[in-house]
């Protein structure tokens, strides 16, 4: 059961209309990294998850995510409000009106085709699609994907904040950005609670790093350096690795018998 509260989750205040900026906001409304995609991703994951704790978390976050398109949609409509009235009433000279609605991006499309209303498209006018939902039905995979999705959404909010001087808009976008961080933390904790959260695979290859791209600027770091890694740079050991592993295991067994 779902119920709607008429109050926005976070108050939005816009200083002045801006159709071009409004169009960019659609990226978080009907875009691939947007709020609707997040809500649908977590909702469908919740339906399939058998763990009561994770199911509850996913439903909570999915429900909150559904409140975020309402905030973004309200921002879009507020930024378009003046233009919507001008187009509907034919206020001003036609040439001036045309120049105002074609100032950049897809603002002319949203103004003419959608009348300044929030449409489920991205900033380029591409319709929202369920193909944005990348759930695969395994909690460890989905939680990792969710963490990455929240990080990508956060980056888009950062970029949107950087292109506006409107303090009210910055404030609302800052709230949405912060909630992405909070959700990312929840997904990380849920992932760490699953033990093990990686399938072991073939143990003899699990901690091997193959230095396949070699040159003067080769670098070492925690991704390929330390006690947990076997670093393989010799070309002859990078081919037919199954045979190389078998040979090494055989030598280890013989050395063990000699000891």
Image: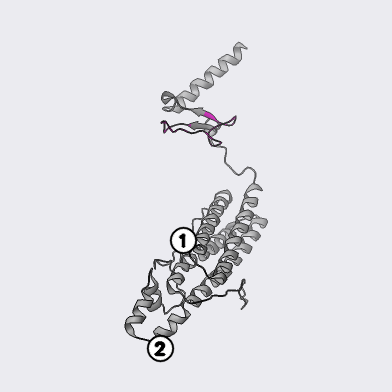
Residue 43 in the figure: left or right of residue 115: right
For marks 2 and 1 on the same chain, the one whose residue lies earlier in the sequence: 1
Camera-nearest residue between 115 and 19: 19
SS class of the residue under badge 1? Answer: loop
Q: Who's the residue at 57% across and 37% down the image? A: 200
Magenta span of residues? 210-230
Left or right: where 168 falls relative to 129: right
Residue marked by disc 1: 32
Relative image position of residue 171 (x, y in whole percent):
58, 68
Q: Nearer the viewer, mark 2 or mark 1?
A: 2
Indicate whether 224 appears above or below 166: above
Does residue 95 appear to the left or right of 17 in the view shown?
left
Residue 105 among magenta residues: no
Q: How many residues crowd mark 2 within 10 Å: few (<14), some (14–19), many (20+)?
A: few
Q: Is residue 37 above or below residue 3?
A: above
How would you rate the neighbour count of disc 1 (Cα within 10 Å): few for under 14, some for 14-19, many for 20 or more? Answer: many
- The residue that mark 2 highlights is 89
- At which x and y percent is residue 233? 46, 27
Q: How far across and down, in percent of the image, does residue 144 sit?
A: 56, 50
- Residue at (64% x, 59% y) in the render: 57
Q: Can you give x and y, in whole percent of width and height, for residue 194 in the image?
A: 64, 47
Q: Is residue 214 magenta?
A: yes
Residue at the location (48% across, 77% down)? 17
Query: In 3D space, how far apart are the residues under numbered discs 2 and 1 (Cα atoms)?
Result: 34 Å
* Tag 2 secondary structure: helix
Q: Is residue 89 above or below residue 234?
A: below
How many callouts does the rendering have?
Answer: 2
Picture disc at residue 51:
none
At 41% from the left edge and 67% from the top edge, which residue is drawn?
127
């Amino acid at each position: 059961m779902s119920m709607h509260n008429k109050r926005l989750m976070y108050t939005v205040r816009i200083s002045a209309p801006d159709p071009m900026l409004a169009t960019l906001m659609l990226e978080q409304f009907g875009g691939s990294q947007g709020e609707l995609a997040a809500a649908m991703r977590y909702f469908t994951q919740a339906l399939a998850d058998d763990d009561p704790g994770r199911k509850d978390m996913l439903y909570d976050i999915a429900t909150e995510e559904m409140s975020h398109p309402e905030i973004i949609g309200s921002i879009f409509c507020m930024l378009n409000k003046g233009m919507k009235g001008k187009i509907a009433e034919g206020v001003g000279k036609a040439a001036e009106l045309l120049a105002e609605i074609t100032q950049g991006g897809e603002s002319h499309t949203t103004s003419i085709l959608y009348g300044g209303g929030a449409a489920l498209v991205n900033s380029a006018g591409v319709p929202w699609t369920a193909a944005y939902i990348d759930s695969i039905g395994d909690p460890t995979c989905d939680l990792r994907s969710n963490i990455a999705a929240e990080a990508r959404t956060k980056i888009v909010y950062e970029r949107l904040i950087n292109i506006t001087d409107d303090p009210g808009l910055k404030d609302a976008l800052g709230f949405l950005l912060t909630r992405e961080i909070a959700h990312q933390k929840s997904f990380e904790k849920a992932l760490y609670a699953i033990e093990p959260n990686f399938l072991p695979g073939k143990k003899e290859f699990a901690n091997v790093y193959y230095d396949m791209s070699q040159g003067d600027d080769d670098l070492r770091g925690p991704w390929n350096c330390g006690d947990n890694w076997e670093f393989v740079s010799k070309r002859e050991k990078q081919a037919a690795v199954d045979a190389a592993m078998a040979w090494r295991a055989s030598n280890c067994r013989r050395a063990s018998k000699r000891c």
